[in-house]
Image (cartoon, grey):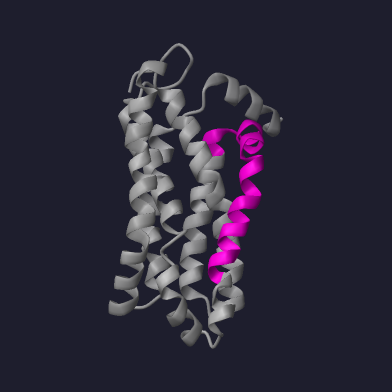
Amino acid sequence: MERRDTGIPHINPWIIVISVMFSTFMEVLDTTVVNVSLPHIAGNLSATPEEATWALTSYLVANAIILPITGWLANYFGRKRLLMTSVVGFTSASFFCGFAPSLAWLVAFRIVQGLTGGVLQPVSQAVMLEAFPPAQQGKAMGVWGLGIVVAPMLGPVLGGWLTDNYSWRWIFYVNIPVGIASIIMTKLFIFDPPYIRRSAAKVDT
């Protein structure tokens, strides 16, 4: 990796697309993967079907709450730091969702998932667009968008298969290898531009 005059390593921008696609895919998948497993979650955690829907609603509400302030958080803390923190938080929350002993704990960890996951899509998009010249941004968006299109369609199929063949808990465990891959690729290939680093540096002083 050669460094530019800005101090940012020169990374193939398509590697950056793949890096941010992991986190985006994981987050969007979780908006639909739970749906078909709700009856199993309700039965296993001694909850009513209506109560079990909180496992879905809590995630979506937390997701919506964090979205409006994502831009401010990215400028304040830096995109890479925010992306890393969010992926680690989302992956950890996925692990604890799988181990949840009650519906209350599941909802609590789903809220953490929603808060950390809501950051992933807009920050990933900003990182990706920064890596491409304007003429190629449309093509990059098209490739990145595959994750957003495929993930919600795959969610119910994957969720149903995992629940029927293993356990509803595996719909959360499946995020862990994807999250680990995202953490590694973010660490290696994602770098903030100078103006973001200058803004984020104020937090450390």
Q: Can residue 185 be seen in this view?
A: no
Which quarter of the rendered picture does the N terminus lie within?
A: top left
Snapshot quadrant of residue 77 = top right
Residue ID at (31%, 25%): 12
- Residue 138 vs 159, above or below: the answer is above
Q: Residue at the spot x=70%, y=28% of the render?
A: 202
Q: Quadrant of the C terminus?
A: top right
Residue at far top of view: 5
Q: In this view, does 23 lie to the left or right of 122?
A: left
Decide which of 92, 124 is in the foreground and name it.
124
Residue sitting at x 37%, y 39%: 145
In-image side of 195 versus 15 (left or right): right
Please report the residue visible at 59 percent of the width from the left and 20 percent of the height from the top. Answer: 195
Residues rendered magenta in the picture: 55-81
Closer to the camera in the image, 73 or 52: 52
| Magenta stretch: helix, strand or loop mostly | helix
Q: Is residue 22 in the magenta section? A: no
How many discs mark residues in the rendered view?
0
Looking at the picture, tell me which residue is in the foreground, 112 or 42: 42
The relative height of residue 157 versus residue 48 in the rendered view (above or below) is above
Answer with the quarter of the image where residue 105 lies.
bottom right
Q: In the image, residue 102 lies at what x, y percent?
A: 56, 81
Above or below 176: residue 198: above
* Residue 126 image position (x, y, % from top left): 50, 31
Q: In this view, does 33 lie above or below 205?
A: below
Q: Where is residue 42 in the image (x, y as percent from the top left)?
A: 50, 82
Residue 160 at least partly seen: yes
Viewer-proximal residue, 1 or 98? 98
Where residue 61 sits: x, y (%)?
62, 58
